[in-house]
Amino acid sequence: MLRQEIAASYQELSEEVEHGAEHPEPVEEGEVDDDQEDTSSAILPVLDSESGTSSPSVRFSKTCLKNVFSVILLFIYLLLMAVAVFLVYQTITDFREKLKHPVMSVSYKEVPLYDAPGIALYPGKAQLLSCKHHYYDHIPPLINPGQPGEIECTTQRINYTDPFTNQTMKHALIVQGPRDVKKRELVFLQFHLNETDQDFSAINYLLFSSFQEFLNSPDKGEFMKDCESSYSSWKFSGGFRTWIKMSLVKTKEDGSETVEFKQETSVVNYIDQRHKPASDQLFFVVFEWKDPFIQKVQDIVTANPWNMIALLCGIFLALFKAADFAKLSVKWMIKIRKRHLKRRSQAMNHIS
């Protein structure tokens, strides 16, 4: 009986070997070592079970832990990919916003000499009595206030139509302004107004950037109309000495440069000490540069395209690495699953 059972089992084992030789399973490249490992691991459980040192449940729990860990890693890298995509979107959005809203940059340039500005005065019925250039803020006392004196300034009178109404004729007195800021050059002007029909007497004026441009202009009337349209106008009152300190601001925006003046004005009351009380009005005004610094204002785009390109390259590299790791993780999980099923089937075949 025993010999017959051994012979029958030997015959069945021979038939299985012959069947395996006739129908071999296809083996992928790179899995030869895995098959050898699987074969050895398929035999080891039987030996371990016979010796009592290990069990299939311990090996299954390790495989399950590996699979869970792989799934967790996969989700972590998917989360990192989502964060990277959000960073790309946010970076592009910030770059576009910075292009739309540039930052104003302010710088100061020191100059020894200014281009002499033009001072356009609109005295009306007032008469220019004297005009002189002084230095170091020293203005000598007036000898004959209210009487005609020396006119040492370069002046021109011009008539042109009002740029806003095109009907009113305007009469302007153009005076060359101070240049030498190191010597604190100033221009002192005195006006006289004999009578006025207004309760308050004042003289309008405006400042433009270059007196030389006015002299070189072929149409001085049109030049003054453009200046009046572009620059602001101010007033100084009668019966006072008005001290005006100017500063120049150049603004560069969208490829065009504009020039404007800022002023600091101080007013001192004039004490009329003439012997005969008179009903006329006297005007005193001083024009001087505040400091030798020209303020330059320009738009600066803070968005640097090279920084954005470098950041995007880094983010895309991280995306490709994350996608590659996720692909390898999925392949590894499938491989582990196939290996587990193969071991299980080999163990079941061996037991049967």
Image (tube, rainbow, N blue to C red):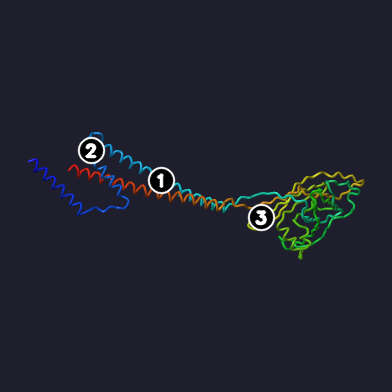
Q: Helix or strand or loop: what does disc 1 sit on?
A: helix
Within 10 angstroms of label 2, few (less than 14), some, or many (20 or more) residues? few
Residue type pointed to by label 2:
Leu
Residue at screen point 26% across, 43% down: 40
Closest to the observer, 341 or 265: 341
Which residue extends farthest left? 1
Q: Helix or strand or loop: what does disc 3 sit on?
A: strand
Within 10 angstroms of label 1, few (less than 14), some, or many (20 or more) residues? some
Cα separation between marks 1 and 3: 49 Å
Q: Nearer the viewer, mark 2 or mark 1?
A: 2
Query: Which of the image's four quarters has the C terminus?
Result: top left
- Residue 204: x and y in percent read 77, 53
Question: Against 303, is 158 above or below?
Answer: below
Closest to the observer, 317 or 262: 317
Query: Which of the image's four quarters has the N terminus?
Result: top left
Q: Nearer the viewer, mark 2 or mark 3?
A: 2
Tell me which corner region of the image, top left, top right, bottom left or bottom right, holds residue 60. Answer: top left
Which residue extends farthest top? 52
Q: Nearer the viewer, mark 1 or mark 3?
A: 1
Residue, disc 2: 47
Residue 252: mark: 3
Q: Helix or strand or loop: what does disc 2 sit on?
A: helix
- Residue 39: x and y in percent read 25, 45
Residue type pointed to by label 1:
Tyr
Question: Against 43, is 215 above or below?
Answer: below
Residue at screen point 68% across, 57% down: 257
Residue 118: mark: none
Q: In the rendered image, is residue 200 in sight?
A: no
- In the rendered structure, are the residues bearing label 2 and label 1 in contact, judged by CB atoms less than 8 Å apart? no
- In the rendered structure, are the residues bearing label 1 and label 3 in contact, judged by CB atoms less than 8 Å apart? no
Residue 77: mark: 1
